[in-house]
Amino acid sequence: MSADLQHIKQVMAEADCLFSEAEVEAALDNMAGAICAELADSNPIVYSVMNGGLIITGKLLPKLPFPMEVSYLHATRYRNKLSGGELFWKARAEHSLVGRTVLIVDDILDEGHTLAAIVEYCRDAGAEKVFTAVLLDKQHDRKAYAGMRADFTGLDVEDRYIFGYGLDYKGYWRNAAGIFALKGH
Ligand SMILES: O=P(O)(O)OC[C@H]1O[C@H](OP(=O)(O)OP(=O)(O)O)[C@H](O)[C@@H]1O
Ligand code: HPA
């Protein structure tokens, strides 16, 4: 059954905007500069992590003026809930990763279990180098391992339930043009 649309609208009306569209776009510009400096000559395969990585990948990649292949992986552990569970793979890589440089693009590094599992999967598949890029890094001490960071991070975000720019609230508001925090969470 689909969510109650009145509730979905109310969630947006009551949310706190943590970063405006302009602030996110500026962060994406900075990320693009750092990625370009590191990967421009590496002929990478770029994997967008579905579904959350969809928007940021579409915004980021046109800012990277060098040759790359682009595809997607689909792994999920929240499944429209507010807290994560076991990682469930829906689609793995179709290319051979042997000897390749891989860039994984996702919306958020929260506890980091998703990204850690994807990096391990790419290494096991023979990738020579695996880089990670996330728009948001949630600030708390529950990371998969102490000090975990992506190679490229757009913005640090407070420890609340976030939506917008690919992140969903119960499957909605991935399209929101800003980073929002759920009231009371
Ligand atoms: O760092 P973690 O605690 O592992 O959480 C981060 C992951 O959670 C979200 O995906 P989700 O499982 O919600 O699936 P979705 O991308 O389809 O929303 C998000 O897009 C990241 O992939
Ligand atoms: O704060 C979040 N919001 C939406 N999806 C998420 N997946 C991990 N953390 C979050």
Image (cartoon, rainbow, N blue to C red):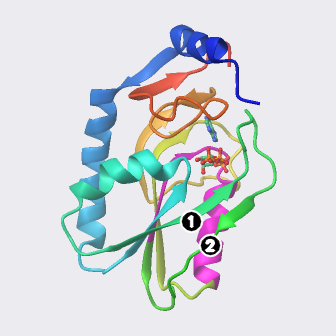
User: Which quarter of the figure is the C terminus placed in?
Assistant: top right
Magenta residue span:
103-124
Q: Which amino acid does the dot numbered 2 rest on?
A: Arg
Report the front residue among 170 and 155: 170
Mark 2 burial class by Cα count in 10 Å: few <14, some 14-19, many 20+:
some
Look at the image and say whether residue 149 sits in the magenta stretch.
Answer: no
Residue 11, percent from left and from top: 60, 14
Q: Give the residue drawn at x 67%, y 31%.
A: 170
Tag 2 residue = 92
Mark 1 burial class by Cα count in 10 Å: few <14, some 14-19, many 20+:
many
What is the residue that sits farthest to the left in this orientation? 65
Instruction: Tell me whether circle 2 and circle 1 mark residues in contact (CB < 8 Å).
Output: yes
Report the front residue among 148 and 86: 86
Q: Give the residue drawn at x 23%, y 61%.
A: 64
Tag 1 residue = 73
Check disc 1 and report its element: helix, strand or loop: strand
Q: Which mark is residue 33?
A: none
Residue 53, percent from left and from top: 49, 51
Q: Give the residue drawn at x 27%, y 28%.
A: 22
In the drawing, does residue 2 fall left or right of residue 176?
A: right
Report the front residue among 24 and 165: 165
Q: Which amino acid does the dot numbered 1 rest on?
A: Leu
Q: Which quarter of the rendered image does ligand 2 occupy?
A: top right
In the picture shown, does residue 182 fall above or below 79? Answer: above
